[in-house]
Structure formats: structure tokens, C-alpha cells
Image: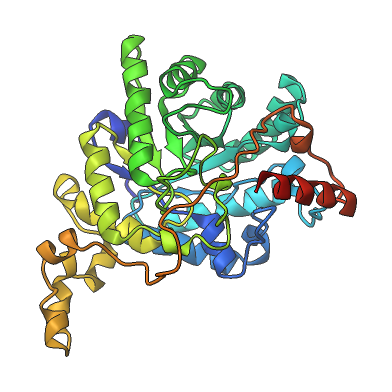
Amino acid sequence: MTPVKKGILERLNTGEVVIGDGGFVFALEKRGYVKAGPWTPEASVTHPEAVRQLHREFLRAGSNVMQTFTFYASDDKLENRGNVLQFTGQQINEAACDLAREVAGEGDALVAGGVSQTPSYLSCKSEDEVKAVFKKQMDVFVKKNVDFLIAEYFEHVEEAEWAVHVLKMSGKPVATSLCIGPDGDLNGVSPGDCAVRLVKAGAQIVGVNCHFDPMTCVKTVKLMKEGVERAGLKAHYMVQPLAYHTPDCNRQGFIDLPEFPFALEPRVVTRWDVQKYAREAYNAGIRYIGGCCGFEPYHIRAVAEELAPERGFLPAASEKHGMWGSGLDMHTKPWVRARARRDYWEKLKPASGRPLCPSISTPDSWGVTKGHADLMQQKEATSEEQLKQLFKKAEAND
């Protein structure tokens, strides 16, 4: 008889480290299965083998959670700005649940059904209309009996609260993750106040994902934790950052960087950066630690290796990786064998190899958010005239 897996709250309540997965959207875009722009997850239906393989790589790297590939899988996003609705949200969400459950069954992993921010909210639709979008996804997750739910990638805490209200109806544990930095959400609500509102709405796990680099995200979750504790409330904390350095970002995060999304590679964090991040997150009291856009399986393996003393074991993928470069002692070149030590990699300051490029950028700062005309969404493709107006605005802001 297959043993019953401990649930997400059982694990966190005992102080167990839960390792999330990495970034599906960016990883599958690079592999040719997701279109940049809409960033929608039709691949769960059209190329299930690609999604399944990425799940398996994260599981092998140490992930305890197989998050359904349902980012932007709401009907209003699947049919937005000319994106053709080839499959319904229900079809995509069901396929994604099946893939996540299949791979989770190959190890000690849970399945998390995920919802994210919606075009409906940005277009100022009513609370009931936005909640109806979340409920359609939640109904699939309940039907497929996922282990818990995640409301992730929210720029406005208000919309995240609405998502929590809906997801709590499932009776399953709810985690909520905002894509904010230390300055708070796009309406200026502080991280601490955001966290308090989410906990009061019913989220048992709160934190941040995406938009900012690992250390910035840890700093933000610390602020959330302080706010929750000041309010006399209790919660568990999660962090799933970008795998890119973002010291030059403003409140909007990496979306405003001129390199987004096709020239971010020079900013990629190393596996050693990730080990430092994992330790910093753990020391801050965060027990759900994973990654978002840019996080590949080797990054998640770095989290699992750094926290192996606390977890009591290494992930399967460490069979092919010497800790702190120790496997380099087998290299043919003596100067490379000399790098088979922790001290070398901890002290290394990696060069970019781009002598004519700046070390930081000047982010775009259009300052638009919910309610602004430029953020009103539409089913129709962006017109030539609309693009011309945006090009003019971009030139004026340069």
C-alpha cells in the first residue's frame, strides 16, 4: 500500500523545509514550447512530454512541490490581445493537473494548483467578475484533487485577496505569493501590510515570487514576516524569486528592465549565488523555498544541496554533481582540478565577458497600473495604430 504523503501544512508545521520548483514559463519559452508575449501554458496540452520532462527534472533536483503549469491559464488571458484560444482554460488546467500528479507520484512531492493575476482585474472589472475567473480554475483543481492551492504573481494585494477568498472555498490549504519588492505593491501598500491582509483573507502561507532577485525577495519576505508578527498573526512563509540579478529595478521589478525578456542572460545567478540565497532564506525563518523565472533544475539542486544538512539527504540529481565543485578533481587540466574546492567558488567574482556593456541599466518608468488606459485589455490583437502610439511614448521616455 502506498504511504500517505504529509500535506503542505503538516510539513511546514514541523519546521520541515519544502523546496518549490523553478520557472516553467521562461524555461519552456527557451525550449520552444511557450510564446513570449502572452506567456500562456497551452504546452500542457500540445506538448505534454516537454512539461512532464521539466517536472521530472525539478523533482530529481529536489523539489517537493509539482506546481501545475497553469500560469495565465484563465480564459480571459488565453484570449487576450490577439492570442487565439485553441484550448479552453478547463482543458489546459486539467491536462496540467494530470501531468503534475503523474510526476509527483514518482517521488515525495505534492501537487499545487496555481492561479495568477488576470486581465479582468487590470481592466477594472468588478470583484465578482474577477472572482468568477478564479473560481473556474479552482473548480478544476478541486475536481483533480490537488494537494494545495497557490495564488501567485500578483502586483496588487487587492486582487490577491480576492483570489484567496475564492481558493479558500476549496477547503484546501492556500498559499499566496505577490510579485512585489521592498517598496510594496503597485498601489504602495507595504509588504507588511500586504501580508497582514492576505493572512486575514485566509492564506496560511504568504510570500513573494518573481520580479526581483533572490536576496531582494528574501528581504521583502522578512518585511512581510515582521508585519504579520506585529499584528499578532501567524503564517508560514515562502519565497520563489527570479534567477536574475536586479539591483537596478524599481517598484515594477524586472518587467521594466530594457533587457526584458530577451536579453536577461548576463544577469543569471550562479548556483553558488543560489546556495547563499537558500541559506539566507532559511535563516530568515522561511521554510518554503523555490524559484521562479530563470530558475532551472540546477538552481533548485543548489537549494537542495545547501539545505541538505537540515533535510537529511541530497537530491537524486546530486549523483552527477560534486558539492562545491569537488567533481572537478577528475578533470584533465590541472588548473581546473585546482578549482575543486569551496573556497575558490565562494570568493569568485564572475566576469560578464562584455567589456562594452554597462553593469546596470536604467529601467523604463512609465508608471502605469490598474485603471490606466494603456493597461486596459482587449480580445483583439494590438492594432498598428496602438503600436505606433506606444512607440512614440517609448521614444519620448528614452
In the picture provided, is 57 more to the left or to the right than 136?
left
Q: Is residue 249 above or below residue 222?
A: below
345 sits to left or right of 267: left
The answer to whether 61 appears left or right of 364 in the picture is left
| Residue displayed at 65% across by 45% down | 72
> In this view of the protein, can residue 6 be seen by the observer?
no
Residue 54: percent from the left, percent from the top? Answer: 47, 63
**Which colour scheme appears in the figure?**
rainbow
The image shows residue 196, relative to residue 278, as above or below, that is above
**Residue 174 percent location from the top left of the image:** 48, 29
Q: Residue at x 45, y 17 (%)?
A: 193
> Nearest the camera: 80 or 142?
80
Q: Position of residue 73 (x, y in %)?
A: 66, 46
Which residue is painted at 51% across and 41% down in the image? 253
Q: Eyeballing the image, is 80 above or below 317? A: above
Please say whether residue 131 is visible from this viewpoint.
yes
Q: Is residue 297 left or right of residue 394?
A: left
Is residue 126 positioned above or below 398 on the image?
A: above
Residue found at x 12% / y 73%: 340
Where on the picture, by quarter, is residue 167? Answer: top right
